Image (cartoon, rainbow, N blue to C red):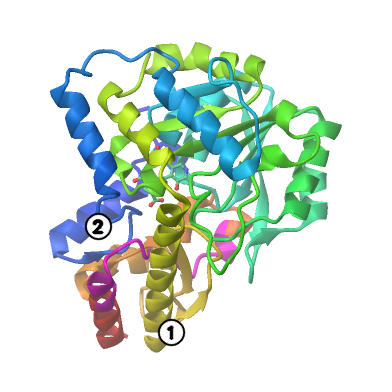
Amino acid sequence: LLGAEGSLAGTIFEEMTGLAAAHGAVNLGQGFPDEDGPVQILNAARHAIAEGANQYAPGRGLPVLREAIAAHQARFYGLTVDPAEQVLVTTGATEAIAAALLAFAGPGDEVLTFEPFYDSYGAVIELTGARHVTVPLREPDFLPDEDELAAAVTDRTRVILVNNPHNPTGSVFGAALLARVVEEAARHDAIIVTDEVYEHLVFDGGRHVPVATLPGAAERTLTISSAGKTFSVTGWKVGWLTGPADLVAGVRTVKQFLTYSSGSPLQGAVALGLGLGDDVYAGFAAALQRRRDLLIDGLRGAGFDVTVPAGTYFVVADATPLLTGDVTDGAELCRRLPGTAGVAAIPLSAFCRPGSATDAASARLIRFAFCKREDVLAEAVRRLQAFG
Ligand code: PMP
Ligand code: GLN
């Protein structure tokens, strides 16, 4: 695989974060916050290390974390999952996605995602040997056409991989659309794997609807989330997956040979985080919404046309005003922007299959992350306005 191109080439996040560092640019590329999460959970991790929680955790995850995950699903969504058999702690959502796809998809199968899609999806589907089928998310709201969705699901579809709220577009799928996904999955007996890492980052009073809460969904749905985004600890790489016991057992089989178990001192701290009050969850979403609005105002002031995201860390902007001379698309612009404007962003093409219709349709689009301090966002805006 060395020297691989396409899905298995180097990740865009490393490339753009590297360029940002090399040029001293404000990094609105890779989505990670520049402030750490709640001090209680940081202290809990410190204590766990000091008190000797430094050897292997059980493969399924520490009981205290599995119980906290089950309690979280009940508290926020009314879902009942058995912490013993229906919860698996993983090394970030990334491992949960990989282990789920490796468990259930292989050569001859199809895995369906929407497009653009989070970059690890394409790479992992390729590793499984399954065929990657995509349904475009259409501007202006970056939602799929339900008929296109229905046409793309076939009896070969083994897994429908949903990401809601959606990276990179920031769109949030509503209950009716998700119900259509469930209906198609049931018709063709497909599993739904749903990546809900931005579940608590929904704005303007909107509500996150987990796929598993819809009628007929729970028995075929694996739900994935992660502490990284909810608690601003992206470097901890503590994620999890919940679902029917037989499906979770399949994923556990793969996980035990990927990583065996996940970071023990962090698990109790994440359990504590999951139990924090509603005010903490709501406060973080509200702070992020203010940052979203600050960046959107600034981008508009710099001449960008932007789509207001309903959730996530990300805003998509139309870079047309900055496309001049030999800078003809978002990918080339993002390669130059750290040097020319002192700001890093990610082209939407990084989330598309090279040469696909969605790739062509989104060639002029770039993604900015707003999970940054307000002064950092203001500086990025100042630089973009001066550049544009
Ligand atoms: N899925 C999506 C949609 C993401 O944006 C990210 C990045 N946080 C991940 C998965 C990976 O999550 P983790 O860092 O927990 O592996
Ligand atoms: N999820 C983050 C993003 O989309 C970063 C992921 C990564 O660096 N692999 O920007």
Question: For mark 1, what is the residue?
Answer: 300
- Residue 153 inside the magenta-drawn segment: no
Q: Is residue 97 visible?
A: no
Instruction: Report if the beta carbon of the residue with label 2 is closer than 8 angstroms to ligand 2.
Output: no
Q: Earlier in the sequence, mark 1 or mark 2?
A: 2
Instruction: Judge by depth and name the residue closer to the eye, 87 or 309.
Output: 87
> Could you tell me which residue is drawn at 30 percent across and 24 percent down?
263
Q: Residue 54, percent across and down?
A: 21, 18
Instruction: Judge by depth and name the residue closer to the eye, 307 or 262.
Output: 262
Pointer 2 local density, CA inside 10 Å: few below 14, some 14–19, many at least 20: few
Quadrant of the rendering where the C terminus is positioned: bottom left
> Could you tell me which residue is drawn at 66 percent across and 39 percent down?
78
Mark 1: which secondary structure?
A: helix
Q: Nearer the viewer, mark 1 or mark 2?
A: 2
Position above or below: 255 against 112: above
Mark 2: which secondary structure?
A: loop
- Residue 370 inside the magenta-drawn segment: yes
Magenta-drawn segment: 359-378
Pointer 1 local density, CA inside 10 Å: few below 14, some 14–19, many at least 20: some
Amino acid type indicated by mark 2:
Asp
Instruction: Judge by depth and name the residue closer to the eye, 331 or 58.
Output: 58
Say the numbered circle drawn on residue 34: 2
Say the numbered circle drawn on residue 196: none
Work out how far the residue at label 1 is from the one at label 2, CA to CA, in angstroms. 23 Å
Q: Residue 356, percent across and down?
A: 60, 53
